[in-house]
Image (cartoon, helix red, strand yellow):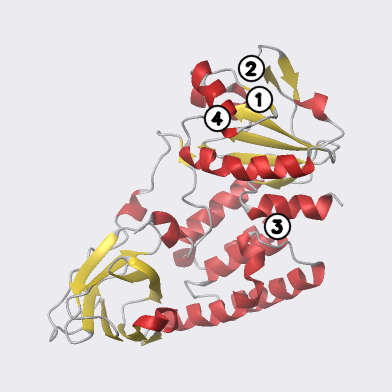
Amino acid sequence: MKKCLLLFFIVPAIGFAQVKKNTAVSKKNLVAKKVVAAPKPEEQKPADGFLIKGTVTGYPDGTAVNLYNGNNGTPEGSASLVKGKFSFTGKALTPDFKVIAFNNVAPYITLFIDNSLVTITAKKDSIGNAVVKGSPSHNDFMEFTKIIKPYEQLFTGEGAGDSVTRSTASTLLGDFIDKHPQSYITPLAVFRNYQVTMDAGLMEKQYNQLPVATQKTAVGDYIAKQFADSKKNPIGKPLAEFSQADTSGNQVALSSLKGKYVLIDFWASWCRPCRAENPNVVNVFNQYKDRNFTVLGVSLDQAKPAWIDAIKMDGLTWTHVSDLQGWGNAVAKQFEIFSIPQNFLLDPQGNVIAKNLRGPALGSKLASLIK
């Protein structure tokens, strides 16, 4: 199963970055789950674990059923349908996302379970409408999903939404957070509210009100990183000046672009997520390049031929700079860039007005700024 499909359920784009190789990995995230195995039909729920019992129609006996960790795509169990039934046992150190796949193809059943007896009833032609019972955590997840369903465009970047829509969504999310302070779904509500408001201060305040146990989850850790990062190069403040050589060896200063909306794009020829995002940046650049907008690419390449070839191959017709020092790039170090792609969007005065806009979110943001 593709990792990106699983990560969609948690926080968009967590996994869509090339990370500096020596970046530390938290050990607790690596040991947070016990690998599960398909139990015998008569097996009972472990005293301190979960039992998932599923009944699904429309698939033939022998169909492969796989259980995955919803945060990172790690396989946690496999089984085969027998008379339309399957089961898994295991132990969750904390309530968390699981994904069940039939024959490893979409659509999937998404769960948020604790150590409960969980029953699933589903049909092949409506897997997305599977009925899940027995897990209080999943009940919270379904309540949360119902709240955010009308506002999905705010989280996918497909629409900026007007101020009334954003205010309503934020109020509903705030109510959920206040109503469910102990829920392991609440960190996700905190992050979704940040996506709506872009208020890092509010995100930090809501995070700090959570119990320590819910703070120390995959989503909680991500939130902590987000508000810590928000204090670096903060939105609403000028981005510090820098200068670096372009492809011809001429120095280009950030200040030389003042007066335009500028996307500072950190990337590299060897970064697959960067290259995958480039067509979107090209489309946006072509749409707005004559409307007071430009892009400044900062490459973390080391080999100049590879850098130049990637620029030509991807049709990146804006200004590019690099000192060809890889992760040691002086500008990347100045702004503490440890994964790519990353970007800053600046207003004509040189102030940061958004960060890490990708996919439709970049176009939506510019559409709201440039009429």
Q: Secondary structure at mark 4?
A: helix
* Residue at x 70% of width, y 73% of height: 169
For label 4, the residue is 313
Whole-percent x, y for residue 325 in the image: 52, 19
Q: CA distance from mark 1 to mark 4?
A: 14 Å
Can the viewer see residue 203 in this picture?
Answer: yes
Residue at x 76%, y 72% (from the top left corner): 165
Give residue 14's position: percent from left, percent from top.
50, 52
**Residue 213, above or below 225:** below
Q: Residue at x 69, y 40 (%)?
A: 344
- For the residues carrying marks 3 and 1, which lies nearer the camera in this image? 1
Mark 3, residue position:
198
Q: Are marks 3 and 1 in contact (CB under 8 Å)?
A: no
Determine the CA span between mark 3 and mark 1: 29 Å
Local crowd size for mark 1, using a 10 Å CA cut-off: few (<14), some (14–19), many (≥20): many
Tag 1 or tag 3, which sits nearer the N-term?
A: 3
Type of the residue with mark 2: Thr
The amino acid type, in three-letter code, at marker 3 is Met
Distance from disc 4 to disc 3, alpha carbons, whole Å, reads 35 Å
Which numbered disc covers residue 247? 2
Q: Secondary structure at mark 1?
A: strand
Q: Position of residue 343 (x, y in %)?
A: 64, 40
Mark carried by residue 320: 1
Under circle 2, the secondary element is: loop
